[in-house]
Image (cartoon, rainbow, N blue to C red):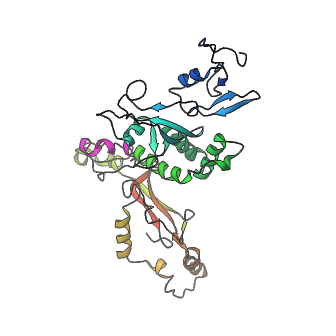
Amino acid sequence: QDLGSACSCRHSSNPARYRCPECFVGPLLCHQCIVQSHRHLPFHRTEVWNGKFFAAVPLATLGSIVSLHSGHGLCPERPKAWDPQNLTVIDVNGVHDIKFCFCYCRTRLPILQQLLYAKLWPATISSPSTAFTFAALDDYHHHTLTSRKSAHDYWQTLCRKTSNGFPDRISSYYQHLLRVSREYRYIRTLERSGQAFDMDVHLHTSRRPGLMAMPCFACPEPDFNMDPAWRTNTPKELSYVNRLHLSQDANFRNQLRQKKKRDPEDVSLFDGRAYYRPEQEFQAYLAAAVDSDQVSYSSCPSKSECSNHKAVLTQNVLKFKYMLIAGIMAVVCRHDCFRPGAQNDLKLGEKY
């Protein structure tokens, strides 16, 4: 198609100078057609021919407004003195400045729910001005599971997708990504575990109420996958079938150093509902627990004729001196599944 030729809409006054590189074999369109064709594709990056090259032009600059009204077009109940609300939306292809028209009908939902219905996760609850698409949060989640990509690297990738030549000019929403991704994963886990739908009310088991961790479905579990009369109906020679095999081990490489400044609001959203015990319950147990001889050696060492044994004991003093968490201990079943509520942090050596 020739540059500047008439658009396919046959409006001679509107030359076809706009294109969308993200649309498959997208034709050159006029101003009105490029906006209309992207009414449901607001996160595509469009370009316009300026006489020398195709320059990037946001859809919001062309007058595109994303309507969250349940019907077609803008909400008819919007105020007379109405202006579209500007929101910064982060998608898999970068950062976008989008103009929104929310629903103003009497039966409207709160703005927070309107964004969630549009698969946009707001960065703040009240008066949101930034949102992440579900696709971007899922994409970040998949990257962390496969390539172990950090949030900082993922954000730098989004900045380069937005402006590869000047990524430093993009406003940083790195802290927003950290917070929103945690919230999103928590809600997703709440759904997949069934706790969002009151699973404990419909499925009576011996598990702890509110548990969100995935149990091992192959291990024997009374009131779930075993015969109700398994104690009396199981022959003695087959008693091993109902036996639960567990093992525990510790990882001293997964450590956490003490920080000079700690955010008191940086708490776990799961807190006892997954693989760790509730933090307050765990700290109360540590305060009442009696240290073993190996742990007590760090404060009051005793003489030992065995040099190897003495070296093992003294390593606690230096190795874990500035460690807030010295390691992680976990319990697994014979099917290599972590047991819910059976994972704890190690404080000093093997103290747990």
Residue 86 colored magenta? Answer: no
In the rendered image, which quarter is residue 106 located in?
top left
Residue 298 % position (x, y)? 51, 81
User: How many marks do you count on the picture?
Assistant: 0
- Give the residue at the far top of this rendering: 10
- Give the residue at the far front of this rendering: 81
Q: Is residue 347 above or below residue 231?
A: below
Viewport quadrant of the N terminus: top right
Residue 294 % position (x, y)? 48, 78
Q: Is residue 207 above or below residue 285?
A: above
Task: Please report the residue visible at 50 percent of the width from the left and 42 percent of the height from the top.
Answer: 132
Residue 122 % position (x, y)? 45, 45
Of helix, strand and loop, which mostly describes the magenta segment?
Answer: loop
Residue 197 colored magenta? Answer: yes
Q: Is residue 75 above or below residue 128?
A: above
Q: Nearer the viewer, residue 308 or 288?
A: 288
Q: Which residues are magenta?
A: 190-218
In the rendered image, which quarter is residue 83 located in?
top left
Task: Please report the residue visible at 27 percent of the width from the left and 50 percent of the height from the top.
Answer: 206
- Give the residue at the far bottom of this rendering: 303
Tell me if 192 is positioned left or right of 172 in this view. left
- Give the residue at the far right of this rendering: 52
Residue 182 % position (x, y)? 47, 51
Task: Please report the residue visible at 50 percent of the width from the left and 27 percent of the height from the top.
Answer: 40
Q: Nearer the viewer, residue 243 or 311?
A: 311
Q: Nearer the viewer, residue 145 or 55?
A: 55
Tell me if 250 is positioned left or right of 82 in this view. right
Viewport quadrant of the C terminus: bottom left
